[in-house]
Amino acid sequence: MSMEVFSQYLVNGLMLGMIYAMVAVGFTLFFGVMDVIQFAHGDVLMLGAFTALVTFLGLDAIGITNPWLQILIMLVVSMLLIAVVGALVAKYLILPLKDAPPLNTLLLTLMLGLVLRELVRLFYPDGSNSKPFPRLLPDHELHLGAFSIRADSAILLVAGLVTIVALHYVITRTKLGLAIRAVAQDGETARVMGINFHWIVLLTFGLGSAMAAIGGIMNGLYYSEINFGVGLLLGIIGFSAAILGGLTNVYGAILGGFLFAALQTVGSVMLPLIGSGVPSSYKDVFAFAVVIMLLAWKPSGLIAERSSERV
Amino acid sequence: MEYHFPKLALGAAALALAMSLPTAVNAKDTVKIAFIGPLTGGSSAIGLGGRNSADLALKQRNANPQSKYTYELVALDDECKPNVGVQVATKAAADKSIIAGVTNYCSAVAISAVDVYHRFGLPVIVWGAVLPAITYGQKYKEVHRVNGTMINQNQVAAEFMAKQGYKKWAVIHDTTDYGKGHNQYFSESLKKHGGEILGTFGVMSDQQDFTAELTKIKELNPEVIFFGGLTPLGIRIRSQMDKLGITAQLQGTSGIKSDAYISGLGNELAEGSLAFLEGAPLEKLPHGKEFSDAYQKQGYAQPPDAYGPFAYAAMNLIMDSIEKAGPNRKKVMADLNQTHDADTVIGKVTFDDHGQNIVPLVSTYVAQDGKWVIWEDSEYATGKRKLKR
């Protein structure tokens, strides 16, 4: 395998991993504060991508054509709107079911995902078909020795890293982060200590959903195409990545996302080498099978919660 | 009473003779022919266009003083549903006054109905269904087909591409019957033209990310990527090819020849993509203009649509055989089986020993300036624009 091809696989895997990580972080944040799985999270990502697309069309219509300005406004509008959507989901669908069996929340969010998907399919003009996502990033090749990467992929990877660092900062260095961690550790005690539990849950869901919006825009910019079904598999993979990472640890989720992408990439390269009868479409089978084995080996995820935290 | 008989009979006979004399030349037997297609539901636009076209052929024949019979159309609705299709096929086949049928657009219906036609010995010509097994799955003497199949489509595609001078392919196909069929028939046809397939990649029909497959393909460095599958995947593959800097030509099947393909990619990225489709626009058909004019004159509520000319040709072939062999199912079937180089609106028709027309009409389309353009009319054919390598 030449260096050029290797670097291409590496970039593919890193990009996929970055998008998965964006989704997985949300699952982890939500589970942290509310002990629920928000199964519509992948579809919230899809909604974020469509919000950005509509914003772009609007900007184009009023004559704002600077691509960097466009991306900035798309990010701001999409993140804000999707954060509100996430908070609304928490307020009206998750919090009221706080004392109900967790299965009910699970079912509810699964159905919400279906509703979001179908709403976009039915009400976005010609929503059943794929929509082109604007190519706003420069697409020339950057060469670093034998290594080559397209500028847009490089920008997206850097942007993803910046997002992760920013999230790390919010969680470890801000009062909001402190409150989120407090609620995640022990909601009752946090409340006794004067933390507004209700608000922290809403803010956490807003934060996680805004991350999904970023993921949606990255997904759109990377593939130059979005469709109403994009969130379905991303949701499942993001969830698996979160579980793989331990489900209570944001860094575990990020690690899980990259690990899953690496498994898929390795699978698609290695599987055809086994024999010509093994198509690369088995890469998902391979990746999920390895995840099953990893979980059988470490049932509580790769970065397990320290037992003392849950007392 | 007997006493009066001769007189009365004579009178009656004379009267009858007097009444019938002026019209005796025109007294013809009526022969019924069935038309089966989706007249309601999602595919009804094509079904109604087919029925109107069959009806047009019949009306033209009835208006011709030289035809030996008066033809009557029995139009039946299969709703594009296999269970309904079998019911109406049985209804038509069990009715002994129906001599033959122009049948089925939907492949799933046709494949269930061919057994019925065979059991009842009703000679039929399929006018739209493309599944190869309808003619090639068995050897029913009753079943014929004027339109081509996936096999023909890929024969034409392979020949066309070889003529453009391409040598090396990579194949991506979805793993449904549709994608697998295209992969199989295209690969077989390509071998005959000396093309080489460097790699074949089966993908899921809802896959989003193709960068892994495409990176491998980039390494293989083919001149053409053949894609056997439908529009949504076609869009993603074309778009991700660009992302990875793959400059190979994209060659699709009938599955991507849709407006959604171009609107999903934008004109610039769709530009130059190739697709192959059964049939041709009316103005490209050998007798398309005459057909089109006659169709207009009848003032049908619906246009003939893509497969109308096939139904028209099928109806004419059946009536030709009835004129020759007489209104008898067995004789009509035997005559249809002999069809060789018959001149029809869609060109020459020759049935092989499976009843399949082996001179099928398949058109090559290229995406040019945001539209699918027939190859012959495109700036690519004139050399003004060039396909990729």
Image (tube, grey):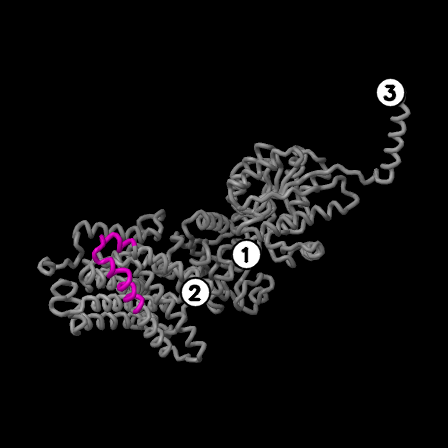
Magenta-drawn segment: A84-107
Amino acid of disc 3: Met
Residue highlighted by disc 2: A131
Towards the viewer: B3 or A52 = B3
Q: At numbered mark 2, what does the secondary structure look like: helix, strand or loop?
A: strand
Q: At numbered mark 3, what does the secondary structure look like: helix, strand or loop?
A: loop
Amino acid of disc 2: Lys
- Asked whether disc 2 touches disc 3, contact meaning CB atoms under 8 Å apart, the reply is no
Residue highlighted by disc 1: B160
Circles 3 and 1 on the same subunit: yes
- Is residue A146 at all visible to an observer of this figure? no
User: Which chain hosts label 1?
Assistant: B
Amino acid of disc 1: Phe
Q: Which mark is residue B1?
A: 3
Q: x, y percentage for residue A142?
A: 33, 73
Towards the viewer: B81 or B248 = B81
Quick one: which residue is furthest to the right in this view? B7
Quick one: which residue is furthest to the top in this view? B2
Left or right, A160 with reference to A195: right
Question: Label 3 neighbourhood size at 10 Å, few (<14), some (14-19), many (20+)?
Answer: few
Q: At numbered mark 1, what does the secondary structure look like: helix, strand or loop?
A: helix
